Image (spheres, rainbow, N blue to C red):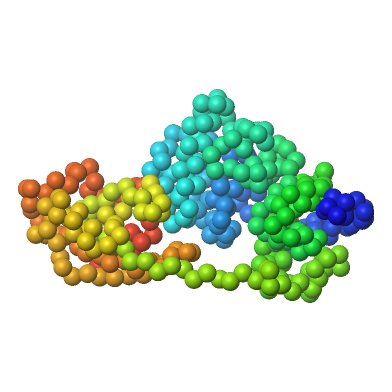
């Protein structure tokens, strides 16, 4: 039996579900978030930032971004480096790159105005079905439902649908969406999945929807038990190059598709690659043999950074680009978090 048939069979269930969810949202929902506006540009920025990132992490980044770029016209004049500067530390840097690519598409295809139809929004880089629906509905330009991770988990439990049955879950999510207060309803979806119907230890006994939940009380089956994968451990080598003016050498990097477009001290997969690179620029005589270490963790990788320092007093044969030397006070582009650790050590 399809999810639609289930809902049609229980015609009162749909109304009751909507009523309970909106009642909960009116009392407990996160309705004071800074992107709770009708400005489609600001909603776009928030939805891109919220991809794979928690609300509490996004809020300060969003506020800083909107302060500097309060509208599309201001942002359209920004370079990728300027966008990356504000994105530093937020992670998943491809999102910032997609914003920059979208600006060019908006300029070329939509006369510099943010698109206001579902298909046009969906055509922008980095935007999928849920993001396009959220932008359209929150801005009041349309009426579409969503299916992010929180909503998928919530609906699959409440209506006992396998969480990998995407067609049924999309059908259900769209059918439940009310004509009135659609924006509040999809925000309630996300808030409820995040705050009540949580991934682990859901608050089943406090849940106001438990009287109609088909999985109440929820107990994870063996199929739903996902083994936590341990982060991969990796060694990484960094070369900090300092000249006689106390400027530091930085270059735009991409390390196994990580930190793409950010600036960093040169980094390498192993020590031999570092030494080979240093030798190619005649840095051998200035290289300090002492190595210092620190840890830097991503969600899926635990890095141990091995840092070597090259203090260049004077060497006319060194051929490093003159455009890549920066004083710490003049850095106005994006850097990874690990580079901040390096800077702090250098300041000491």
In the picture, measured across the screen, residue 142 lies left or right of residue 213, that is left
In the rendered view of the protein, which quadrant contains the C terminus?
bottom left
In the picture, measured across the screen, residue 243 lies left or right of residue 255, that is left
Tell me residue 38's x, y (percent): 66, 41
Tell me residue 245's x, y (percent): 15, 53
In front here: 241 or 159?
A: 159
Q: Is residue 29 visible?
A: no
Q: Residue at x 14, y 46 (%)?
A: 319
Tell me residue 324's x, y (percent): 24, 46
In front here: 160 or 142?
A: 160
In the picture, measured across the screen, residue 341 lies left or right of residue 154, that is left
- 165 in relation to 37, above or below: below
- 66 in relation to 339, above or below: above
Tell me residue 279's x, y (percent): 14, 54
Q: Residue at x 50, y 47 (%)?
A: 95
In the rendered view of the protein, which quadrant contains the N terminus?
bottom right
In front here: 105 or 2?
A: 2
Q: Where on the picture, by quarter, is residue 283?
A: bottom left
- 58 in relation to 226, above or below: above
Q: Residue at x 80, y 68 (%)?
A: 215
In the picture, measured across the screen, residue 324 lies left or right of residue 112, that is left
């Amino acid at each position: 039996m399809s999810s639609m048939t289930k809902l049609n069979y229980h015609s009162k269930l749909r109304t009751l579900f909507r009523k309970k969810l909106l009642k909960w949202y009116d009392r407990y929902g996160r309705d004071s978030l800074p992107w709770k506006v009708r400005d489609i540009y600001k909603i776009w920025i928030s939805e891109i930032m919220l991809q794979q990132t928690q609300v509490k992490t996004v809020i300060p980044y969003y506020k800083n971004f909107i302060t500097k770029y309060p509208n599309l016209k201001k942002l359209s004049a920004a370079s990728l480096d300027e966008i990356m500067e504000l994105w530093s530390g937020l992670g998943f840097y491809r999102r910032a790159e997609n914003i920059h690519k979208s600006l060019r598409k908006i300029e070329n295809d939509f006369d510099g105005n943010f698109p206001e139809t579902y298909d046009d929004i969906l055509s922008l880089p980095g935007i999928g079905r849920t993001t396009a629906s959220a932008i359209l509905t929150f801005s009041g330009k349309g009426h579409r439902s969503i299916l992010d991770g929180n909503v998928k988990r919530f609906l699959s439990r409440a209506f006992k649908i396998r969480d990998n049955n995407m067609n049924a879950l999309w059908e259900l999510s769209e059918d439940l969406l009310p004509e009135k207060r659609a924006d509040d309803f999809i925000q309630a979806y996300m808030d409820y999945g995040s705050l009540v119907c949580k991934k682990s230890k859901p608050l089943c006994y406090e849940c106001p929807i438990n009287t109609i939940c088909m999985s109440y009380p929820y107990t994870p089956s063996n199929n739903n038990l996902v083994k936590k994968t341990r982060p991969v451990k990796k060694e990484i080598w960094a070369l900090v190059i300092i000249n006689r003016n106390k400027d530091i050498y930085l270059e735009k990097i991409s390390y196994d598709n990580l930190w793409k477009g950010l600036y960093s001290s040169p980094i390498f997969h192993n020590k031999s690659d570092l030494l080979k690179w240093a030798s190619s620029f005649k840095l051998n005589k200035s290289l300090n043999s002492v190595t210092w270490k620190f840890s830097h963790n991503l969600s899926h990788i635990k890095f141990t950074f091995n840092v070597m320092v090259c203090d260049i007093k004077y060497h006319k044969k060194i051929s490093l680009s003159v455009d890549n030397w920066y004083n710490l006070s003049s850095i106005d582009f994006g850097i990874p978090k690990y580079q901040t650790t390096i800077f702090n050590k250098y300041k000491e």
